[in-house]
Image (cartoon, rainbow, N blue to C red):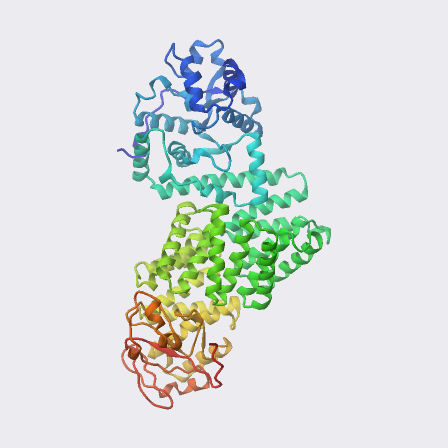
Amino acid sequence: MPLIADMLVGATHPPRGLSLTYFKHFVDAFGGREAFQDLTTEQVCRQFVIPFTKSTTLSLVDHVERFVFNGNLYVQPAAWFVSHAWSYVFLDVVDALDHFMDEHNLTNEKDTVGLWFCTFNNNQHKAREQSFLHWYTTFKTALIAIGNVVMVFSPWNNPTALTRSWCVCEVFVATESNARFEVAMTRHEKETFLQHVKKEGDIMGHMLGKINTAKSMTTFPSDREFIFKIIEQGPGFQKLDRTVFATLETWVVQTLDTQIALAPTADEHVEWLCVKGDLFHLKGAYADAEAVFQSAVAIYNHVGDRRPPFHWRAVMCLALARKRQYHAQEAWEPLFLDALVHQEELLGPSHDHMIETMIYLGESYCDVGAHIPGMRLLHRCYAAVIEAHPRMKQLSTVALSLGRALKTQKRLVEAHAYLEAAYNASKCSWGEDSFHTLTNGFELARCYSSQGKSATAFQLMNSVYQTQVRTLGPEAHGALISLRSLTLILSDQGDYRNAESNLVKCHACLLGLGEEGWAYDCLNVLGNIYLRLRKYTQAKAAIEATYAKYQEMFGPASAAIRIVMFARLLVAMECPNDVDTMDKISSLESRVLVADLQHETWTEHPCHGCLQPIQGTLYMCPTCPRYSLRFWQVCVDARKFDQSSPYLSVKCDRLVEIPFKLTALVLKWLDYVLQKACTLMYQHARTKQVVSINQPIVLYVLTSPIPRPNCH
């Protein structure tokens, strides 16, 4: 099978087509719209085109040009290549092209511009005689020569064209040849489309769920086989899906820009800007979203407090875009609060905009550790949504935020229930591959991972990642943070292949996107993987760099800093050179105190047996990947780790303890004995008993001078 580039042959003459005027004349000549009512293009071909051209056995274009009175007036140089499905209702295709030409200021060209329409251009009498190569070369040669493609969407929310191999291939050729790409809908479909976009959003999620070239179909199975071979030899299905999606995304953005430019009022101007900002936000382009929302907010900045409801939604969206980029709290909190006050005054406490603002403010509070006000807002929203007999979309949104908030508090059992509900609701509402469903699946997979369910986490996260790469591209925000999480999940299973290269790539790409928070999160994960591999120098460098950035972004006592500090202390416990001077010990101790870690609770490390915070001693399994599963004394005594994972079947009498002081007693670390290369052996300050971390199960102890009551 030759490659795509080798399959082109030169055209003997410029492509021709029939004018839209002739399309309408054709309908009138064979009984008018009544005769064509509900007939598909395929039926029109069989009932009208083939019988009409039977005497000459030519294509309709050639027949009209040679044998129809004034036929030369109808046959014109083709200016548009029409991509459509033969199962479409023919009149819908005609009406869509008619409306398309009107809205693109081409009304005067309906008589003078030819449309390359395969039903009319190809010789239907010889269709079955020609090879696939003939038809492929015919359409590709015509498309490249014409340079303009218009795809008919019918209906807009489930366009059959996106499921047909020929049509998908046409989109790819259009992109490959830098052809202009447009979408045509009937006037009614376009109005329905715009209303849906304005009301529901996530239009790209709808289209995303329809694009899967590996599942596209053809009328003749042999055509599908040939098309698939071309795709496999050329771009591959994943790249082709991305190309199709990017082309449609460009069209959607252009359509929104048109609506923004044509908005008759300031209110509609703001509303359409919010729709565009939502599109960027959903796919993780937070900086682009912030710029759009900033423009929307600026429209009413000059009118004081007399601003309409959509202005305050734009303010809320601006706050959320800043929060998603890890801006300081003072950059987003006042915007949330300002929006909340005015929305309650203008719309009432149960309006969708009001609930939306409370959801995202509550989630944002929980992200920065303000759990009391955050959870109060989220529970209030959840109750309001349930009481109002919610749509699945509302339920998905509030359940996702509650799940995220509970996960940040390490309340994993509760978080899992909400995230699973959000994921299932989003699949019902938006479909398997929508942005919403992918986001919910990402969060649920991370929750599985936090519970030690790495196999389940991998299955879901890998599905999310592959879909994001296929549709958004490997360097999109969503794909990068999913790759980061997927790499961590694989390391929990002991698979470190490509871990370093994946995380270095994620770090660099996210920095390029302006996503410093996520970029340094990837660096912290890389530091943890270096620790697992006993590459202490690299681990320390990555973790220290993350600490410095997080201290600047979130402050030295933030939850993000505590996560990094735990990793930093684990490096210190294993690396003798890290605590061999009083200055090094004092530096670590001061950071521990500022981060409020001078206690015996591993606040960021729940037990994988009971999912509660570990108190005091932390146990690990010697046969599992390092730091992948953690337990505390109660679950070890109850033999929980026999049941928690298929990897674990270790008796408790094989455990060994490493004392570790995180208070003023840390100054006595110099009394501990250093043993073995790259292994720090600590000696308990009272018993002077030396222990080794190379025992079958490792456990660490956090103690405090004033013991706190056990949470169990």
Give the image location of residue 223, x and y in percent: 32, 30
**In this rendering, position of residue 525 left or right of residue 625:** right
Above/below status of 711 relative to 457: below
Q: Residue at x 50, y 24 (%)?
A: 38
Above/below status of 610 relative to 279: below
Quadrant in the picture for residue 523: bottom left
Q: Residue at x 39, y 69 (%)?
A: 608
Residue 544 appears in the rendering: yes
Give the image location of residue 44, x and y in percent: 45, 20
Q: Nearer the viewer, residue 408 or 311?
A: 408
Q: Residue at x 50, y 20 (%)?
A: 36
Quadrant in the picture for residue 208: top left
Residue 16 appears in the rendering: no
Quadrant in the picture for residue 519: bottom left
Give the image location of residue 342, x and y in percent: 69, 55
Location of the N terminus (image quadrant): top left
Give the image location of residue 314, x and y in percent: 62, 51
**In this rendering, position of residue 459 left or right of residue 328:** left
Count of residue discs: 0
